[in-house]
Image (cartoon, helix red, strand yellow):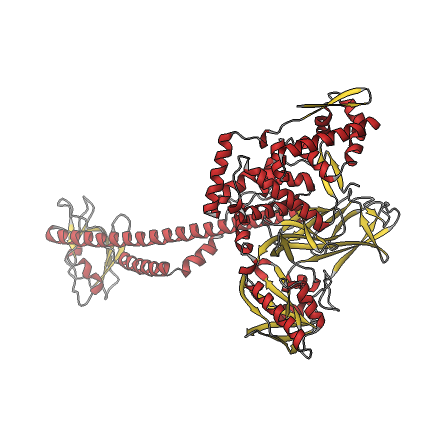
Amino acid sequence: MTDYKFDIDGKKLSTEEIDAKKDFDSFYKGVQTKGKSLFQKVWFWASTGMATIIIGTLLFNNSNDFSNAFAEKVKKDPVSPDNLTEKPFVNPPFDDLIVEADIFKVNANKGGIFKSRYGSILRIPALAFFNKKGKTITNKTIDIRFTEYKDVADQIISGIPMTYDSAGTKYMFSSAGMVEIRGFIGDSAVNLNPEKPIEIEMKSDYSSTEYNFYCLDEKNKKWDYLGKDSVGKPEPIKLTKEEINAQFPEVKKEDVIIPENQIDAELQKAPEYQKRNRKSIQIQAQVEELSLSTPTLPIKADKEAEKFSLDIIEEENPELAMYKDVQFQLEKGESINPNHANQNWNNVSLEKGENHEVLITFSKTNSHQKVQYKAIPVLDGEAFEKAMQAYNEHIGKSEDLKKKLKDAKKQIKFLRKEIKAKAINKQLLEAKFERLEQIATLEKAKLENIGIISEVKRYFSVNNMGVFNCDRAEKMIVKNNSIIKNIKFGRNVNEAIIIDIFPDLNGIYQHTSLINTDFNEYSNSTKTIGICNKKIGVLKDIINGSQIFTVKGKPKTKNDLIEWLEL
Amino acid sequence: MRYPYKTGNKLKTIAVNINPQYHKTEDQINSEQQLVEAAKVDTKNFRPIYNKYYEIVFRFIFQRTGNEEITTDIVSEVFYKALNNLQKYEFRGLPFSSWLLRIAHNETIKHYRKASRSRVVKLQTEHLQNLTEEENENYLEELKPYLLTVLKGLKIDDLQLIEMRFFEGRPFKEIAEIMNKKESAIKMKIYRILEKLKVSLQKK
């Protein structure tokens, strides 16, 4: 009879598809690792030696502690210490600890879209489920149990093997996310119609496209490579310029209004202003002081006009001292009454009138007689020159001070302008930032409204129930290799489940430690733990083949693991 | 090349579409030999060989597994064995690919023994056309179930010769090299299988 099956008009591969699988460098590295002949390998001699010792011991010393079962195991598989003890393929190490799953109630006729606790989306088509006989399930509610294994703690709890074997070379899985999907009606498992795959958008923290997509083949105890998932990184939703401007008009400089009192307040706080203001006040005071003593413009005496002078005794009439050299010039054509000129007037008062005129009143203390003359104070000769010079000097000084005052005020004005410009720019920038924030908030709100969150999603579809993993196979690099003589896990034990932890790669590597077998320490592992009798221990040291664990206990929660293993 | 046989009242012939991929000029074969010699000196020089023959080996195995993942693994094993045994390779005027394909053939058999699965024979409808040289597509469709039935009646060893010769278009010489048999023996074997097919078809 035939022992083959025909695949008629099946998938044809293009040269490009085949070329994509071609990777000489990886192949060559693999060759270098496994390229040593059997007899060249350390473990071969170790295993051979060990097997010899065991056989010898069994023949000549029946009282030895070695069990027959163990010897049988070694005989069966002397070169694979990692697999010496048979354990369930998926072997959750802790009885009371599981990774929490989402349960979705799915109408088998309609299917539906479901969101997990982490934000992953499942799109389940209508009539997607088969019963055990392969018939489509209708009019039933299916419980879909969806579990996401997000981190190394979840991986440890799950007991799902995170190792991958490719052509005899072992790799660990660096996971971008692993999910388990199962369907039930009551306690009975249901299958998925392969032609109606469930589409999954898995929320992930890893955006690399270097990950492959695998399905756990629990029957054959291996991971099946299914291809590649696709990665979706949410692009920020860009609003159009029109939308942005309509909702958030662009802020312009001229739109920024700052109250004057605010600027003044800012100005007064400025040390430069205080300095300049002090100077200004000082100059102002000088100007005012000077203006009080501003002399009248000296008028030169008219030779034609009649004049008289006052005989002033400065000591007695200091207020008139300024008129000592002054002549009082009458209007043209007027003259002094000679009678008045020859009398002794012991009181003289001067009152300023218009146009430089002075009203001079002469009176006597012993009579009511008094006379008045309107005259203009004038100077002549040297006195005029001196007065003119003094006047000019005073005016010059005054002008100078006024100029300084003007400059000081100008500087303050300039400083104020500067402060105002700075305040406007600051406010403008703040307004612009605020606008950008508002736009970003709107964009984020839009993202959330349409269900796209700010993290990476990996897209794939599954056409069977099971465990699916977006992974990258990372080669295990052996740092040390030793024969384990003793396992101290609180007390001495014969074996322990070993888990190497790689937090940076979000992966673990599970193997077994068994006395008198090879044990590998891997260079890229940050921590190695052991599990024995449901208890966790952290590998402290290996001294002369003696493995020493610090026992932490039986974890009750995921947090226990995180705390104990400092994850 | 045509092999006459009769189905019912119609005289049919079997045609072979020779795939040029497997046919090399003397110069090409000599140039391959230089690549092999370089790789013998330093295994790093195996890269051009790997790159050159990857597709040929991949297609050969994929034809027999129909599974990309399994094929990738077997291909790696083939090249690993080839590299490890390169010193033993002797140039006999045949393309290097024949030697690689012999390893591929053995590794595929080994895989099926280990996996306890049915061997896959990938087949395109036009391959059946190669067998019959039937131009009329309608008639070919009519003939297809009969052809498949008679092919299924063949032993796996016989079927793989048909596969290599008519589905993959390999020359007798190359088939002989892959199967590690003499060319004349392969020719004779294939004639006999065809005779058997002819008889089976006439019975249908």
Residue B197 image offset from top left, x and y in percent: 77, 30
Residue that appears at 60% across and 56% down: A171
Residue A469 vertical position relative to residue B151 in the rendered view, above or below:
below
Question: Looking at the rendering, which quadrant does residue A109 occupy?
Answer: top right
User: In the rendered image, which quarter contains the C terminus of chain A?
Assistant: bottom right
Residue A94 vertical position relative to residue B8 in the rendered view, above or below:
below
- A528 or A186, which lies in front? A528
Question: Looking at the rendering, which quadrant does residue A75 occupy?
Answer: bottom right
User: In the rendered image, which quarter contains the N terminus of chain A?
Assistant: top right
Residue that appears at 26% across and 47% down: A355
Residue that appears at 57% across and 50% down: A437
Residue that appears at 79% across and 26% down: B143
Residue B196 in the figure: left or right of residue A74: right
Residue A446 vertical position relative to residue B25 in the rendered view, above or below:
below
Residue A80 vertical position relative to residue A376 in the rendered view, above or below:
below
Q: How many marks?
A: 0
- A303 or B90, which lies in front? B90
Residue B86 image offset from top left, x and y in percent: 52, 46
- A198 or A513, which lies in front? A513
Q: Is residue A240 among the parts visible in the rendering?
A: no
Residue A123 image offset from top left, x and y in percent: 75, 46
- In the picture as drawn, the residue positioned furthest to the right comes out as A139
Residue B142 image offset from top left, x and y in percent: 81, 25
Question: Looking at the rendering, which quadrant does residue A560 occupy?
Answer: bottom right
Q: Is residue B50 among the parts visible in the rendering?
A: yes
